[in-house]
Image (cartoon, helix red, strand yellow):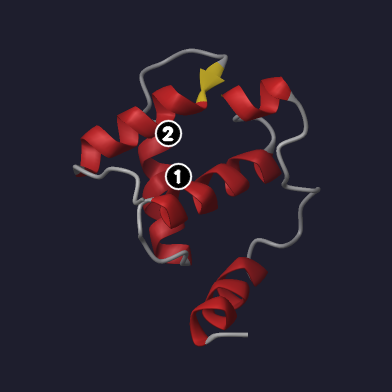
Amino acid sequence: MTQQEQELEHAKGDWSRHDNKRYIGKIDRVNVSLSESWEVKYFIDHYLQTRGRAVSNGNRDKVVHALENFPGRAPYKRDELNAYLDKLWGLSPKA
């Protein structure tokens, strides 16, 4: 296991008390249920990873705080949440 993988596993350990965090069906690949904490946690970790940011509790807290101010209404679409966060911080997905 590489150093980066070890650091990622250590960071994820703080959020490990939740259900299976894999996308289950089509709806779960499109929407994020902000009432299901495991789904929100997975979304946040995935967002940070795809934006080249460290998966840390500090970064997670920043994303959580930003999501609390999201102006949209349920159902929350992943693409809309990504676009909102990207615009807020001037980020984009890493290739």
84 versus 86 height, above or below? above
Residue shown at 48% from the left, 12% from the top: 73
| Amino acid bearing label 2 | Glu
Q: Which mark is residue 7?
A: none
Q: Residues within 10 Å of mark 1 (few under 14, many from 20)?
A: some
Instruction: Classify residue 41 as left or right of residue 89.
Output: right
Horizontal and vertical percent for residue 58?
40, 64
Secondary structure beneath label 1:
helix
Horizontal and vertical percent for residue 50?
42, 51
Query: Is 67 in front, or is 8?
Result: 8
Instruction: Classify residue 75 as left or right of residue 17.
Output: left
| Amino acid bearing label 1 | Val
Horizontal and vertical percent for residue 33?
63, 27
Residue shown at 51% from the left, 87% from the top: 3
Residue shown at 41% from the left, 23% from the top: 80
Query: Is 18 in front, or is 3?
Result: 3
Residue tagged by mark 1? 64
75 versus 16 height, above or below? above
Residue tagged by mark 2? 68
Toward the left, the furthest residue is 90
Toward the front, the furthest residue is 95
Query: Which quadrant of the rendered structure holds the N terminus?
Result: bottom right
53 versus 78 height, above or below? below
Horizontal and vertical percent for residue 14?
63, 68
Q: Tags 1 and 2 in contact by the CB under 8 Å rule?
A: yes
- Quote the CA–CA distance across marks 1 and 2: 6 Å
Q: In which quarter of the image is residue 26?
A: top right
Residue shown at 25% from the left, 45% from the top: 91
